[in-house]
Image (spheres, coloured by chain):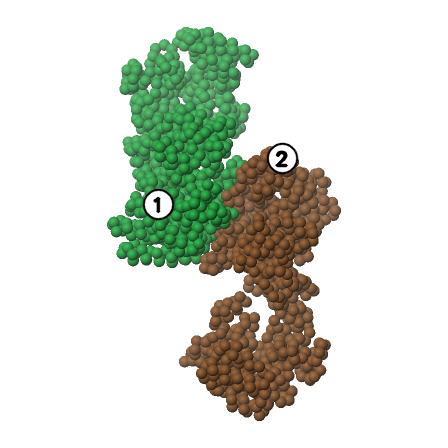
Chain colours: A green, B brown
């Protein structure tokens, strides 16, 4: 009995009815609100999720009871009412109840043509959406409605061997069943899950008495909204079409504008009183529903009805503008404005985008590694990219994978496309750091650097010089050039982030390696640099050669001599960073990668180096070979280099301190932070602290300046996390490098994971790719252990996350819960992270 | 005042004196014991460590007070008394107190020649050891003692411009000072620390009244011990020499044997009553000191004196025999016998050794990776090694480093020598597994496989075919052939280990991959196989080709077809293991390494493969290149292969179960254990458990046999340890693979660590190489976390350590403290581990 009641459950929407968006859907709930606001909403019955689910399973509802709620010969529309209108749903069906008898009756009331059009609309809609007949058979032209209706009814009979159903109860039952079932289809499931719906999201349905929009007197229908959907600017938008139903006005050439400000005829001019009523309803809904709504309306014989209200679908830019405007108008609180913007939406605003509605000739797809769109000539080498840049040509650097020596090319390219690599591969990390649109792991592509060709999965061969567009926001590679839309960081964007900064309680710094990065970080109001990776500073032409000489040096003296030449350049690097970030902390990580990354990897490069160093090629090959490692990730790098070849860190420390002294001399107090990578034992920190302190003292003496500095540790080995209690004895800060920590915790190289990660995620071996989604259960526990033990030893130790996850919501929620001081992320991620931080402070679950 | 008393502290040794080995040294303590046993020990004064330390610092002692303890014109010897006699010490000095006056007096008593010899001995000893004069000036021939004495006294004057000191007090003071200072020398420090002495080990000294051994009547001196030092066999050994002092008898051709059983004249025949006294003392000391002692004795005018007693220095084999014999004679408890043998000493017994006293022409030194000595021709490739083996020639495989494809060569070689790699490199691990003498990381060597030459650091060039000997116990490479001693596993060895098994409380299994390994493990009484690495089974010629075909297959069907051909071979592998280990558990780890390890790495190999597979060479090169990984250790291997290419594990499971069914059919109940490598998430285990269960069911149906099996996990990623609670839900056992766990915890590849590990250990960045010494602080904590969480979920989950550390004392102590069920180690390590386990159970600290 209980079940019987439940599956027959429905509600006549009224101000008093018990309804909610999570039982009856957003549309039903909204209709109730409109009723409470005294808007002229036609009588409507709402079927909750459970009833619709029962219908999909072949049960209920009590159609007689539903029909009894309406006038005897009413017609009905049925519309979907999912919890969130973004999740989609089946198309609306209008004019249910039309049959031969009603057609005859209506013909008298509103004329045969109008009645025939209504009946035709229903037959076509029913045939296609309910009876699932061939749509091509139901495209009768409407110029001669009566004939078109007869054709449609004949076609229905021909296809089904049955006359078109005449019983309104049967019609309604079939419509409800077909809509309920459509919701359960696989495609519908996938589509709504892609928009964030849970797997068990329900569908409600609303059955509404039709206001006709056709017939005698002033009749018609339209759609109205109060903003421009693209910009968010407040203005009346929409259309009206006389003698029409539903959303006909949106597509018809004959439809008129609503407001007199627009070009052409308008509803405001033709029916000022109706327009005034509409405007009043719009103001009411904005003010009371606290949202920019889109309303369908119908005018029947001069009387206005509001059929519906849903959130205006809008661009990211519009969303920000609307939220800020609502808050500024005191309609919503600033906190609500902050919570209304999905943080990732801000990314769209920071980068060029392929214009909406562009015809996308997609020839390949990879991972969307760094957002934004870019166009340019295909080029297959960093050198060519530089040559093209020198000629003012835009190019897309296409590589199997990128290596540090490609950075010069990436710096000048408009975008990067690689065949291999995952979301944290070199190309992806650098691309995001540079704000450079990047697609990585486009596995269907076959790149031949020798032939200078790029072959797609479909066999299309693209050559160097051919134009392509990459969309780093979607991962799509398009052939040719398309229209791009420039980023827009307008006042509302800045206002919103200002509000975010007022409420958030965790710091946001940027990972920035170059003055350009630092400037971007500063522009986005980062609170400092959380990770400056110094190795990228060594890949510029001249420096690379000196570094290679240093590596080839056999004695400490020779290494020192080579590094001596790099010193002024490094000092200048840091000087620029200090100047750009004036007043903000700059955390510099000392040299980290294995030395062989600095050496050439191909024969040409080795020959060049042999010439430059006046050595036999065989010597260079042997040396490069000797320095190769089985597992470079786990080899001689980071602090291990600092201990075994101390000259490098000595030089870097000197450069940092000399730049600090110079800043002090200019009156800028700078407190540099020096970070040691890949630590696994306390003694590593002890030994280097002694050396670095000595360098600091020497620079203070030689410069006559006194300054402070902080030495800290990048916690990125599991052992450093476990031994953080020891390590914190000598560390002013602990910054968790979650990239490497994830690699070591899983025993999984990010560069090699691409081969099987998709299989793993598909089979749900891993819930998510841990390089994209912070692994709270494993990596997170080590971070927590490290933080707890570090603080137990040194209660004021500064804690942060500086790995790629740093700007992600789950990692930020975790860091905030642990009381961390800040996170550090790519410069272009900083605004997103600021908003995430604000939302976390406001209690939004991550 | 307190200090003055301390630095003058000395003790006349008596039965009642308060003395201990850790304050006065072992020799002093032993002399007290001999006195308590009523042996005729001359009057002796013991200087404790603190007094000797004060002497070294230029203070004390009160020589007058010491001399006052002796007769007016006594002569003295001074001998070192360190805590453990193995730790060495300065040479004894005899006849202190001799001067011109005493010489004159003694000449009357015992004759001029005898008195001159005594004075000469003292002058020579004093000149060289105390005054540090040129030894060449003090080698006066003793045929004419009086002249020799005069020469020596003249030489002393010539070198020092001073007459030889005549004051006995001055003589004694200088002797004590020089001996105290010698103990503090750098060389002495290093030597004793190499034998396990702590850095602050102290030296005691004993001043003993001389019994002359020369003079009128029956005089002489000798040394006696009750065992053969090499074999441990109970027999009277030693020498006696009339008219001699100290240990003269041991070197003199004229010395006679002690017992009549020996060839030639004997003390027993010449002086049966003295011999009988000696024998009685020997019996007493063995029975009461509970040890095989070596005694110096002197006979003065027919009266026997026992000057001294120290443990007989003995070989490993003798040590075992002595301990067992003492226990069997109820002189010591079995527990004491077990505690007396340093476990690593057993390794010496298990392998051939270079004979003691061999002239060692050492041309290179590397890490002693796998103990034992081997001789053979140098060969530079696995193929040549096989060819030589086919001709019955012994060879040493010399490689820069070894790869899995070298295993065939290692299997037939007598030993392995590599230029690169650490204690857990491929060559070292396989070498130990095979019980194959191996030296790795012989960094001074330069190997040219192309020229087939091996160049030492000194420029010596050795060619293929040259004979060398490698000593894997010391890491030394010798040129040419030398005498080797065969291993001896006699009854005492077996008896001792039998006792060990009675007391130990943690299991010992073996890591065994082949029937030969398994047989060794069984011979050494391993309690099962704890780790059978199946990948080594795929490197045999035929199988390798099939595996490569499997890797090149594009479809699941083709992979299955290739694996189908391997199935019978794998089934046979496991069948043999089950037969050898009948009744004992066999834990089989499924395929673990990255697939490209199976592929050829050089051009020749690729050409062979291209031919075998009828593919273009370029295809093979491309495929090999495509499968290469940045960090193979962290790549597509282990359980990740099991999930992405499930056909391999399916085949292995089928082979295991079919072999199990066949064993059941023969009436042997076998419960195979299947272990999944490189797990990092519970779901990996869940997915594979479903597949493996299905294979088991299918085999039960097809074979008509029912059997049981256990599925477990090798915990070797930090994440698996952290998530052991989840993982144990589906695991019958958790076996900690400490090799990989150490690599990942430190972020340190064992193959790459060699470059800087020595620097790191020298600078004490790491206290020890964590691949050799279990890192209890870091890796250990993860093991503990894993064990605790595993048991919290599944209290009966079987826990073990199967990494390289498995048989080491610290790891075993750790595993035992955590209540683990067993450890697993190399077959040749099993006896050592059994003894370690016994000692741990008996409370010896690790």
User: Is disc 1 placed on a helix, strand or loop?
Assistant: strand
Residue A50 shows in this picture: no
Residue A395 shows in this picture: yes
Q: Is residue B135 above or below residue A7?
A: below
Q: Residue at x 44, y 32 (%)?
A: A475
Question: Which chain is mark 2 on?
Answer: B
Foreground: B467 or A530? B467
Label placed on residue A529: 1
User: Is disc 2 placed on a helix, strand or loop?
Assistant: loop
Question: Which chain is mark 1 on?
Answer: A
Binning the other alpha carbons within 10 Å of mark 2 as few (below 14), some (14 to 19) or many (20 upward) gives few
Foreground: A99 or A837? A837
| Same chain? Circles 1 and 2 | no
Binning the other alpha carbons within 10 Å of mark 1 as few (below 14), some (14 to 19) or many (20 upward) gives many
Q: Residue at x 38, y 58 (%)?
A: A690
> Residue A425 lies in what quarter of the image?
top left
Q: Pointer 2: what residue? A: B614
Q: Position of residue B31 (x, y in %)?
A: 57, 79
The residue at the far left in this view is A667
């Amino acid at each position: 009995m209980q079940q019987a009641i439940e599956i027959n459950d429905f509600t006549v929407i009224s101000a008093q009815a018990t309804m909610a968006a999570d039982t009856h859907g957003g549309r039903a709930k909204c209709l109730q609100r409109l009723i409470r606001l005294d808007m002229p909403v036609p009588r409507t019955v709402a079927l909750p999720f459970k009833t619709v689910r029962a219908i999909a399973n072949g049960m209920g509802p009590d159609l007689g009871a539903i029909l009894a709620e309406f006038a005897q010969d009413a017609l009905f529309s049925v519309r979907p009412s999912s919890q969130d209108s973004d999740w989609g749903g089946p198309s609306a069906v209008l004019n249910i109840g039309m049959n031969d008898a009603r057609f005859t009756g209506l013909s008298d009331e509103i004329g045969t043509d109008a009645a025939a059009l209504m009946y035709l609309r229903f037959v076509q809609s029913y045939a296609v959406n309910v009876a699932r007949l061939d749509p091509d058979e139901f495209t009768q032209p409407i110029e001669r409605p009566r004939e078109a209706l007869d054709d449609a009814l004949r076609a229905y009979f021909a296809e089904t061997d049955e006359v078109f159903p005449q019983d309104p109860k049967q019609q309604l039952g079939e419509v409800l069943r077909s809509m309920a079932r459509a919701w359960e289809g696989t495609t519908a499931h996938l589509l709504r899950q892609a928009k964030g719906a849970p797997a068990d999201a329900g569908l409600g349905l609303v059955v509404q008495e039709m206001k006709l929009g056709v017939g005698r007197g002033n009749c018609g229908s339209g759609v109205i909204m109060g903003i421009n959907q693209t910009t968010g600017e407040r203005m009346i938008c929409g259309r009206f079409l006389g003698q029409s139903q539903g959303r006909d006005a949106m597509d018809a050439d004959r439809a008129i504008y609503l407001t007199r400000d627009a070009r052409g005829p308008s509803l405001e001019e033709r029916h000022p009183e109706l327009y005034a009523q509409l405007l009043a309803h719009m103001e009411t809904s904005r003010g009371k529903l606290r949202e920019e709504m889109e309303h369908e309306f119908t005018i029947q014989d001069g009387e206005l009805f509001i059929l519906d209200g849903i959130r205006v679908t809008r661009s990211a830019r519009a969303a920000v503008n609307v939220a800020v405007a609502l808050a500024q108008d005191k309609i919503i609180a600033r906190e609500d404005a902050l919570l209304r913007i999905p943080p990732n939406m801000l990314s769209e605003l920071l980068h060029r985008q392929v214009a909406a509605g562009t015809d996308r000739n997609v020839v390949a797809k990879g991972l969307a590694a760094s957002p934004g769109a870019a166009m340019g000539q295909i080029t297959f080498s960093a050198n060519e990219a530089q040559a093209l840049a020198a000629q003012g040509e835009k190019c897309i650097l296409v590589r199997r994978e990128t290596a540090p020596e490609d950075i010069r090319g990436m710096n000048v390219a408009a975008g990067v496309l690689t065949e291999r690599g995952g979301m944290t591969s070199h190309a992806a990390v650098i691309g995001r750091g540079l704000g450079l649109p990047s697609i990585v792991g486009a596995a269907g592509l076959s790149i031949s650097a020798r032939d200078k060709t790029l072959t797609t999965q479909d066999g299309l061969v693209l050559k160097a010089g051919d134009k392509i567009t990459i969309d780093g926001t979607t991962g799509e590679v398009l052939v040719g050039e398309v229209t791009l839309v420039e980023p827009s960081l307008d006042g509302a964007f800045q206002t919103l982030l200002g509000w975010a900064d007022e409420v958030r309680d965790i710091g946001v710094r940027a990972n920035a390696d170059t003055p350009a990065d630092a400037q971007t970080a500063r522009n986005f109001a980062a609170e400092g640099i959380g990770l400056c990776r110094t190795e990228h500073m060594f890949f510029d032409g001249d420096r690379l050669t000196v570094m290679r000489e240093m590596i080839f040096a056999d004695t400490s003296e020779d290494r020192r001599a080579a590094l001596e030449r790099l010193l002024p350049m490094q000092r200048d690097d840091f000087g620029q960073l200090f100047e750009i970030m004036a007043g903000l902390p700059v955390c510099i990580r000392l040299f980290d990668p294995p030395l062989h990354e600095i050496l050439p990897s191909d024969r040409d490069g080795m020959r060049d180096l042999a010439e430059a160093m006046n050595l036999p090629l065989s010597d260079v090959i042997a040396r490069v070979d000797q320095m190769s490692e089985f597992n470079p990730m786990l080899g001689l790098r980071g602090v291990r280099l600092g201990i075994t070849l101390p000259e490098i860190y000595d030089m870097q420390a000197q450069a940092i301190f000399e730049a600090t002294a110079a800043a002090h001399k200019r009156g800028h107090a700078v407190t540099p932070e020096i970070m040691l990578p890949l630590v696994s034992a306390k003694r590593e920190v002890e030994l280097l602290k002694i050396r670095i302190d000595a360098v600091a003292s020497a620079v203070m003496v030689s410069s006559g300046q006194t300054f402070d500095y902080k030495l800290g540790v990048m916690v990125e080995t599991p052992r450093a996390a476990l031994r953080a209690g020891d390590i914190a004895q000598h560390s002013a800060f602990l910054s968790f490098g979650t990239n490497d920590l994830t690699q070591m915790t899983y025993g999984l190289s990010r560069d090699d994971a691409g081969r099987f990660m998709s299989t793993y995620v598909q089979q749900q071996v891993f819930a998510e790719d841990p390089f994209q989604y912070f692994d709270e259960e494993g990596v997170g526990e080590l971070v927590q252990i490290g933080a707890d033990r570090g603080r137990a030893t040194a209660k004021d130790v500064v804690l942060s996350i500086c790995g790629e996850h740093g700007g992600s919501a789950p990692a930020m929620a975790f860091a905030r819960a642990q009381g961390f001081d800040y996170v550090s992320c790519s410069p272009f991620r900083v605004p997103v992270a600021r908003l995430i931080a604000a939302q976390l402070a406001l209690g939004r679950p991550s």
